Amino acid sequence: MLKILKKILKKFIPIRVRIYIKSLKYNARYDKYRYDGKKIFLFGTPHSGNLGDQAIVIAELEFLKKHFPKYRVFEVPVPIISRSIKYIKRIVDSEDLIMLHGGGSVGDLYLDAEIGTRAVLSNFPNKKIVFFPQSATFTSTNQSFKELKSSQDVYDRAGKNLIITARESKSKEKFEQIFSKNTVILVPDIVFSLHSELHNKRKNILFCMRKDSEKVLTYADESTLIKSLSQKYKNVYISDTTISEIVTRKTRVEIVNEKWDEFRNARIVITDRLHGMIFSVITGTPCVVFDNYNSKIRMTYKDWLKDYKNIRFIDESFDSNEIMKAVEEVIDQEILPIKFENKYLPLVNAIKEAEMQNKNDSFE
């Protein structure tokens, strides 16, 4: 009854008021841990139903727990950065670390996240700040050029105090071009660092396609492909890695695990989602994958996965017969566990570099 009442009340409370109330809760939490040892503030975590993005947070937290166990991590979600940052500034000690959430949010495609990043860089000019693995996306509009210039001004002021981690080589080249005053390193998407349980009993054909501006495949082509799959195989299951509900810190792991169960139960995955491909890899599920409009899937495949024979990247125009041939070749085949541990060393070293700078600053 109480939950139902809360849902009803939420409908009548303006979104700005809800965000402000949420920021007060976070501010109280940060004050509570003011003197609680070493802290890592992870800025820019998501609040949406994009489960690829939520899996990134899970991986980031696991990564920090494994490599930097003496720190306590505090998330600062995108919607409350502007309201919480002045409070966080008061309690950040010289030994604390500032991290920025990874994904594909650098650019003007997800502008609220980019504006949050600018706020973090502007408020901590003397801190060495490290991005988790990112992709770059600035569109070709007049507004995009203005946003790029705004970001360049802020990023340039950070200089070598900002370490940008690219998750594929095309973004690395882009970052080095547009943010030439910062340090840029290359590691795989952080979700590759997760390990998921594998299932032996698989029965579904999982069709996992996006429905947003990053889409390349037409809906007509999708319908043709679904029809071909349904004619040949039973249990064609249509899904996506984005859901409509809000995902919180408390529900994140459970909801992402439920999505991974869909992949674990699949004989094959057909997807144009980057994390559709990555979820396939970490669950040992064969995959046929299409590119998206900014080539982050193509480059992730070429940089890190081209030697995995049971992942097929469709690198040509739509041909239903050729796609079905690829499906037939890899369905029910095993994907061997990936071994990317050493590939994350540049990121580990970058965070250690920030640690060392903190120690040096504390002695000055």
Image: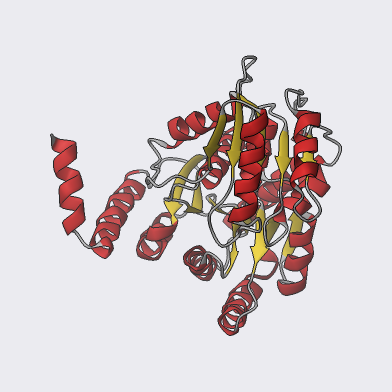
Vertical placement of 82 versus 210: above or below? Answer: below
Toward which corner of the image does residue 217 lie, by quadrant? bottom right
Q: How many marks?
A: 0
**Residue 293 pos. (x, y %):** 67, 61
**Residue 82 pos. (x, y %):** 39, 66
Toward which corner of the image does residue 219 lie, by quadrant? bottom right
Residue toward you, 238 or 153: 238
Residue toward you, 250 or 52: 52
Side (left or right) of 262 relative to 13: right
Residue drawn at point x = 71 percent, y = 47 percent: 347
Side (left or right) of 63 relative to 28: right
Residue drawn at point x = 86 percent, y = 37 percent: 307
Q: Is residue 62 visible?
A: yes
Which residue is outermost to the right?
307
Residue toward you, 325 or 137: 325
Quadrant holding the C terminus:
bottom right
Q: Give the colour scheme of this rendering.
A: secondary structure
Residue toward you, 33 or 205: 205
Residue drawn at point x = 57 percent, y = 78 percent: 147
Vertical placement of 166 versus 54: above or below? Answer: below
Side (left or right) of 271 relative to 84: right
Side (left or right) of 140 relative to 23: right
Quadrant holding the N terminus:
top left
**Residue 246 pos. (x, y %):** 37, 46
Vertical placement of 343 versus 129: above or below? Answer: above
Which residue is outermost to the front?
231
**Residue 210 pos. (x, y %):** 56, 51
Q: Is residue 166 visible?
A: no
Which residue is outermost to the top?
200
Residue drawn at point x = 76 percent, y = 55 percent: 185
